[in-house]
Amino acid sequence: MATGTEPPGTATGVRSPGRADIAARHLRTDRWWLSPAVTAAGLLAFVAYSTWRAFANAHYYAAPYVSPFYSPCLAENCVPMRGGPNWEIFGSWWGLSPALLILVFPLGFRLTCYYYRKAYYRGFWAAPPACAVAEPHRTYTGETRFPLLLQNLHRYFFYAALPVAGILTYDTVLTFRNADYDWGHAGLGTLLFLVNIALIWAYTLSCHSCRHIVGGRLKHFSKHPVRYRLWTWVGRLNARHMLLAWSSLISVALCDLYVYLLATGTFDDPRFF
């Protein structure tokens, strides 16, 4: 097979020495670049917004709502939340935003997620940029070296994501109070939090690690009917993992934005009852 004519060491990707000498980088005629570009833009927007909110250390509580970016609050510099998850584990020595103590777990879970890996590998690293479009890199080592070796921590981040989802569920229950902490009330924020926690749980349980935990390494499904039923349920969610990944990412940002707008006095929470 013919090889490229470029001097050794001057070309990369499909033009590198030893690769087939094919003039066209790909044969696709559609706008293949649109999907990775939109993905990169969406992820960049969330990173920029979440970074701003995580370091803001303000306007994250408007009774009875607490931003999911700041729950649970693990330092003494948290705004007191009546009945909320105020756990002063780190004491007064922690002077930075308390969001930085908890966001590492849900963000670690999403960063190592199989879908998000594909999304930012294609969107930012062009590895590869799209199906049937060759990557521009000279070599490929997969996830066998640092830092990509850390992707193997995904199953452990899944275990950490479960209690975080449980705490956010508790926060959602607390939204059935009014600003005076009386029970039996609901507002627009309550509806947003209900949608968000449903999407958070759906995304978390649709994880490939969850699917493996409930039904993996079984030689005979017939001998484990309960685990098989759970495996089929998780499998149905797993088929929509990409949709749930984006939906839950948007919903958690919207909940935080809603709390921010309430806390800054931009508008009042409309109450249904």
Image (tube, grey):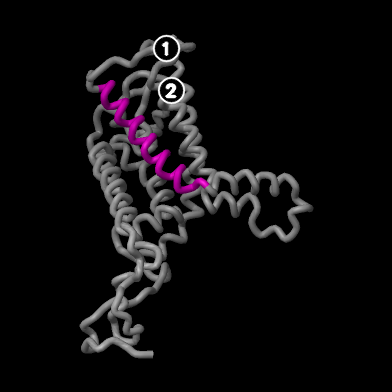
User: Of all residues shown, which one is farthest toward the front?
Assistant: 29
Q: Secondary structure at mark 2?
A: helix
Image location (x, y in percent) of residue 188 = 38, 19
In this view, the residue in front, 171 or 273, is 273
Q: Which residues are magenta?
A: 240-263
Residue 105 visible in the displayed image: yes
| Quarter of the picture holding the C terminus | top left
Instruction: Tell me which label, 1 or 2, sits earlier in the chain.
Output: 2
Residue at x 33%, y 59% (from the top left corner): 30
Image location (x, y in percent) of residue 168 = 45, 32
Residue 95 visible in the displayed image: no
| Quarter of the picture holding the N terminus | bottom left
Tell me how far mark 1 sits from mark 2, CA to CA. Answer: 10 Å
Image location (x, y in percent) of residue 159 = 51, 47
Q: Secondary structure at mark 1?
A: loop
Image location (x, y in percent) of residue 48 = 24, 44
- Against 173, residue 130 (above or below) is below
- State the residue position of label 2: 191
In this view, the residue in front, 198 or 16, is 16
In this view, the residue in front, 13 or 23, is 23
- Residue 39 badge: none
Residue at x 75%, y 50% (from the top left corner): 224
Task: Confirm whether the magenta stretch covers residue 251.
Answer: yes
Asked if the residue at tag 2 contacts the one at tag 1, i.e. Cβ–Cβ closer than 8 Å, the answer is yes
Q: Give the dominant element type of the magenta stretch: helix, strand or loop.
A: helix
- State the residue position of label 1: 272
Q: Inspect the image, locate mark 1, and give the three-letter code of the amino acid beneath it.
A: Phe
Q: Residues within 10 Å of mark 1 (few under 14, many from 20)?
A: few
- Against 158, residue 84 (above or below) is above
Q: Inspect the image, locate mark 2, and give the three-letter code of the amino acid beneath it.
A: Leu
Residue at x 38%, y 64% (from the top left corner): 148
Residue at x 35%, y 69% (from the top left corner): 27
